Amino acid sequence: MAVPAIKPTGRERGFDANEIIVSKTDLKGRITYANDVFLRMSSYAEVDLIGKPHNIIRHPDMPACVFKLLWDTISAGREIFAYVLNLARDGDAYWAHAHVTPTYDGAGALIGYHSNRRTPDPGAVAKIKPIYAALLAEERKHENKKEGIAAGQWKLNAMLADAGQTYDELVWSL
Ligand SMILES: Cc1cc2nc3c(=O)[nH]c(=O)nc-3n(C[C@H](O)[C@H](O)[C@H](O)COP(=O)(O)O)c2cc1C
């Protein structure tokens, strides 16, 4: 059964600097663990999250090309730092500064992923918002989703090339 889309309220909420929102996933991005801060911020009960795809908290204002970069990076076994806007079950939004890492078993096989999120600096959020808005606008020019993501990726890469930065460097420079 299709899950009805959650309507964003336009309200944003925050969390404390000494808190970390934690989740773990399997290789497909299905949630295997969420800590109490995750549950509180997302307004979901644990039972509603475990086994669900992580896009359950995807906010429609997030450009898809950022998630493409995230997946390309972590599935290649590398870590990424990213600013992510999430959508809680009640429609409120929250920004997070995420550190997403691959998880390996004792034999060195990639077995899943782990994300730790801290509350971002408000100044950094103010700077990333117009960048993400520009990427989203680029993606929305295309009816075809794949073409939209490719155009967003192209724009992001052009912005980064102009600034002489990688995405991680951009994240840390804000
Ligand atoms: C460990 C991990 C953490 C993630 N955290 C988030 C998150 O906080 N918010 C989010 O929207 N997507 C997160 N994602 C990415 C989602 O899997 C998904 O790619 C994204 O929500 C975009 O959804 P879509 O691919 O269906 O368009 C995470 C993925 C992994 C592997």
Image (tube, rainbow, N blue to C red):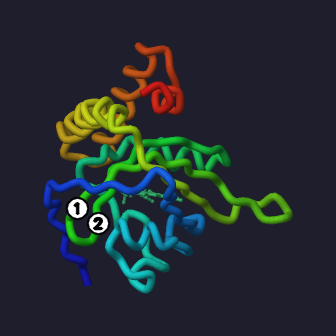
| Residue at the image point whose x is 42% and y is 55% from the top | 16
Q: Is residue 121 above or below residue 25?
A: above
- Across and down, in percent, residue 144 comes to 24, 47
For label 2, the SS is: loop
Q: Is residue 46 above or below residue 164?
A: below
Q: CA distance from mark 1 to mark 2?
A: 5 Å
Q: In which quadrant of the rendered image does the C terminus lie?
A: top left
| Residue at the image point whose x is 39% and y is 20% from the top | 158
Q: Quadrant of ligand 1?
A: bottom left
Question: Marks 2 and 1: in contact by CB < 8 Å?
Answer: yes
**For the residue marked with disc 1, what is the amino acid?**
Asp
Residue 67 showing in the rendered view: no
- Across and down, in percent, residue 89 comes to 27, 71
Q: In which quadrant of the rendered image does the N terminus lie?
A: bottom left
For this view, does 121 lie left or right of residue 164? left
Residue 47 showing in the rendered view: yes
Local crowd at mark 2 within 10 Å, few (<14), some, or many (≥20)? many
Which residue is label 2 attached to?
A: 88
For this view, does 35 lie left or right of residue 39? right
Q: Nearer the viewer, residue 9 or 59?
A: 9
**For the residue marked with disc 2, what is the amino acid?**
Ala
Q: Is residue 19 above or below residue 82?
A: below
Residue 92 — which label? 1
| Residue at the image point whose x is 42% and y is 25% from the top | 157
Local crowd at mark 1 within 10 Å, few (<14), some, or many (≥20)? many
